[in-house]
Image: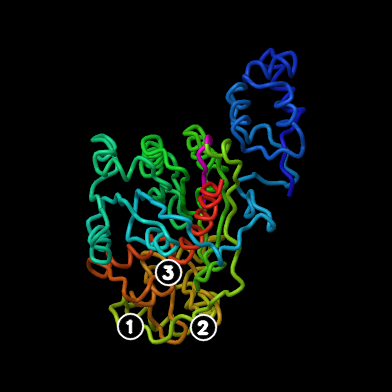
Amino acid sequence: MSIHIDKELVRKYMKEKGISSQTELAALMNITKGQLSVILSKQFQPVKKNVMKLCDTLGLDFIDILNINKDYSIFDMKELTTKPDRYIDTSKVIKKRKYTTVEVFAGAGGLALGLEQAGFHTLGLIEKDKHACQTLRLNRPNWNVIEDDIVNVTKRGLMNYFDNDDISNIDLLAGGPPCQSFSTAGKRRGLDDTRGNMFKYYVRALDVLRPRMCLFENVTGLVHNNKGRALRTIIKALSNAGYTLKYKVLNSWDYGVAQRRERIIIVGIRDDLLEQYNVEYRFPKPYKYKPVLRDILNNVPASKGAKFTKEKKEILELIPPGGNWRDLPDDIARKYLGKMYDMSGGKAGIGRRLSWDEPSLTITCAPSMMKAERIHPTETRPFTVRECTRIQSYPDEWVFAGFMTETYRQIGNAVCVSLAKAIGLSIIHTLNEIEEK
């Protein structure tokens, strides 16, 4: 897939702005005519610093002047920016020195644990949920867990929460702002929801800490929300903060997780480092091994788990492994789905019984709720807490604070640990390249 700037569209917008020549446009952008010619060539990858200057000069988002040889938006592309030959094999990546990270919106530690496994040293984690903070402290007593709203932390001064010697030269800022407003399982109000605007506090942390690299993750609903407007807004904010970005939808199943769980991953390198060291970030190469439930749900520790009601269980007993509500007799299916029976779309997850020979669907915060049901392959029940943690690739020794409902919520909101590790290793590869130069 080729993506380049449409020169005819640029000429159109130049005319609207009263700009008569490329020489004049280059001067307004404060670059040379030669640099502008490079930007407008078909070989140029458009998400670069000078392209943002071009868009700012014309008062546009970069999506407005792209020519894409596919009949859909750039933000609907599963491949987004990365071709297979641009992946990095992370199997042999070893850190050159101790790399440091701070995480905002840390949750129950899936991302932090994966980055730790990759080789990062955590300087601090900001999280307002008391149960998630208790989980972090139970498992890593030495971590600097800041239990407060990021809004309050930024108001008081982010630097006041860290040792100045450690935080002044940080390598990575990581985090995934609240995603419910973009989730495909919710109403998807996006940026119109207060939670959808929390990414601004990630950007503020980026402005204050100035890490070498940044990692931003979220649900794939961000890609589709309002035809990509939410993602464009976030990318523009991160770019304006001084980072050159790569972004891609990654599937956890490609990275050793027995679960089909996609996330949009945005990774940035600080512009001055990119210019000084001429490095490029590459996403982790997908693993050959793709586990299924049979591979991971062996000898799972006993734990609490949600239950179906007696009436619901009797209905779900009729669904075979790998099936869903469509396998029910029609009269029972109509009764079970009610008004949803005649609705189009959005019903594939209802009454979904997994099979041993497939990965799980996305683990949710409420595994017994209709539309989020994840039925055990051979027993008519939701997955237990410990089964869900296995599916999310947490180690068995990782414990969760709070009652069962809180535990399911923490697990369902987490980043898969093995995916986080793979991303962490790919970031370390880039940091190693900077160190070597």
Q: Position of residue 13 (x, y in %)?
A: 69, 22
Q: CA distance from mark 3 to mark 2?
A: 16 Å
Helix, strand or loop at label 3? It is loop
Callout 1 touching callout 2 (CB < 8 Å): no
Q: Amino acid at mark 3?
A: Gln
Q: Judge the density around disc 2: few (<14), some (14-19), many (≥20) Cα neighbours within 10 Å.
A: some
Q: Position of residue 52 (x, y in %)?
A: 59, 30
The C terminus sits in image quarter: top right
Please identify the dominant SS of the magenta region. Answer: strand
Q: Which residues are magenta?
A: 265-272
Q: Amino acid at mark 1?
A: Pro
Q: Nearer the viewer, residue 271 or 132?
A: 271
Residue position for label 3: 392
Against 17, residue 399 (above or below) is below
Q: Position of residue 209 (x, y in %)?
A: 37, 39
**273 relative to 66 in the view: left or right:** left
Which numbered tag is attached to residue 356?
2
Residue position for label 1: 301
Image point 68% across, 19% down: which residue? 26
Image point 46% across, 74% down: which residue? 351
Helix, strand or loop at label 1? It is loop
Q: Nearer the viewer, residue 218 or 349?
A: 218
Could you tell which of marks 1 and 3 lies nearer the N-terminus?
A: 1
Q: Position of residue 255 (x, y in %)?
A: 54, 67
